[in-house]
């Protein structure tokens, strides 16, 4: 699904960057990793939500992996 129409960035693009190992906490950081900038800003809420989902998933995985 396209999250950012201005830069034609999909949710998969954002998830790929978020799972790269770097701790990203803002839309601007994600866009920087993708080589572009936030333009109109309408997508920033969706980008943050995806980052929060990734962060929650990592925390859950870490809790489950620790005996």
Image (tube, rainbow, N blue to C red):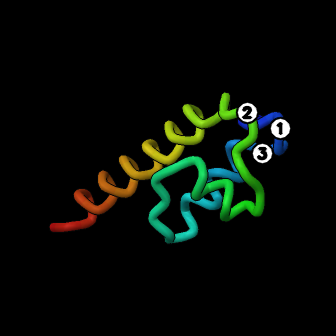
N-term-proximal mark, 2 vs 3 = 3
Task: Give the labeled residue for mark 2.
Answer: 40
Q: Are marks 1 and 3 in contact (CB under 8 Å)?
A: no
Q: Residue at x 65, y 51 (%)?
A: 14
Dot 2 crowding, Cα within 10 Å, few <14, some 14–19, many 20+: few
N-term-proximal mark, 1 vs 2 = 1
Q: Nearer the viewer, mark 1 or mark 3?
A: 1
Residue located farthest toward the left when viewing the structure as drawn:
67
Q: Residue at x 73, y 60 (%)?
A: 34
Q: For the C terminus, give its image quadrant.
A: bottom left
Q: Which mark is residue 31?
A: none
Q: Secondary structure at mark 2?
A: loop
Left or right position of 35 against 30:
right
Q: Secondary structure at mark 3?
A: strand
Q: Secondary structure at mark 1?
A: loop
Q: For the N terminus, give its image quadrant.
A: top right
User: Residue 61, position in %: x, y?
Assistant: 33, 57
Q: Residue at x 68, y 43 (%)?
A: 11
Above or below residue 48? Residue 29 is below
Q: Nearer the viewer, mark 2 or mark 3?
A: 2
């Amino acid at each position: 699904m396209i999250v950012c129409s201005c830069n034609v960035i999909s949710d998969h693009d954002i998830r790929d960057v978020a799972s790269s190992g770097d701790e990203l906490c803002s839309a601007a950081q994600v866009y920087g990793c993708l080589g572009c900038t936030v333009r109109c800003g309408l997508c920033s809420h969706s980008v943050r939500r995806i980052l929060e989902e990734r962060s929650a998933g990592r925390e859950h995985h870490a809790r489950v992996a620790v005996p």
